[in-house]
Image (cartoon, rainbow, N blue to C red):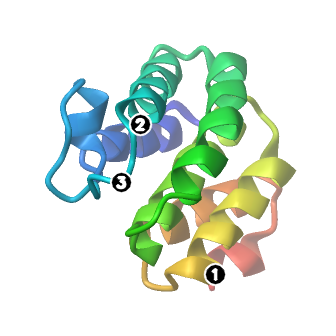
Amino acid sequence: MSFYALGTILWALGAGLWGSACAGGRSSSIPPSVPNEPLAKLAQANEYLTKGQCDRAVSLYREVIPRIESQQGLAPYQVAELYYYLGTAYLCHKDIEGAIAQFQRALALEPLYHPARNALAIAYMEKNLLDDAER
């Protein structure tokens, strides 16, 4: 993966709905039904990802996303963002197939979620699937 592509994805992490959760706070967009403990783990996974500790990020995202997803009050775009983060961690880990699956999962929940669409195009380019990347 090019440094530009990874840099673009990592930059986008800081602009997400979970940004204040990553900083240790609770965003007003996060429903109160989501306990603080999974949010702390999400923040840790984001930190691992930004530090390039991809395997640790994947492991922690895989642990925490089902716990957050099971909570009441989450909008589809919020869950899509979680799968985008996991896809980004897979992409960082050089698991392109895993990344593609997670970006597609995010887009199934929220078809207009542009960060996932852009990251999916990057993943397709990594696999030299240029026709798919252009869609």
Residue type, numbered disc 3 = Ser
Q: CA distance from mark 3 to mark 1?
A: 24 Å
Residue at the outermost left position: 28
> Which mark identifies residue 33?
3
Of the 4 image quadrants, the one containing the N terminus is top right
Query: Where does label 2 land, which residue?
Result: 10
Dot 2 or dot 1, earlier in sequence: 2
Residue type, numbered disc 2 = Leu
Q: Where 32 sits versus 113, above or below?
A: above
Residue at 77 percent of width and 34 percent of height: 94
The crowd level at tag 2 (other Cα within 10 Å; few <14, some 14-19, many 20+) is many
Q: Where 25 sits versus 98, above or below?
A: above
Which residue is at the front of the view, 116 or 6?
116
Q: Secondary structure at mark 2?
A: helix
List x then y, in percent, for residue 60.
Answer: 64, 27
Q: Where 34 sits versus 94, above or below?
A: below
Dot 2 or dot 3, earlier in sequence: 2
59 to the left or right of 14 = right
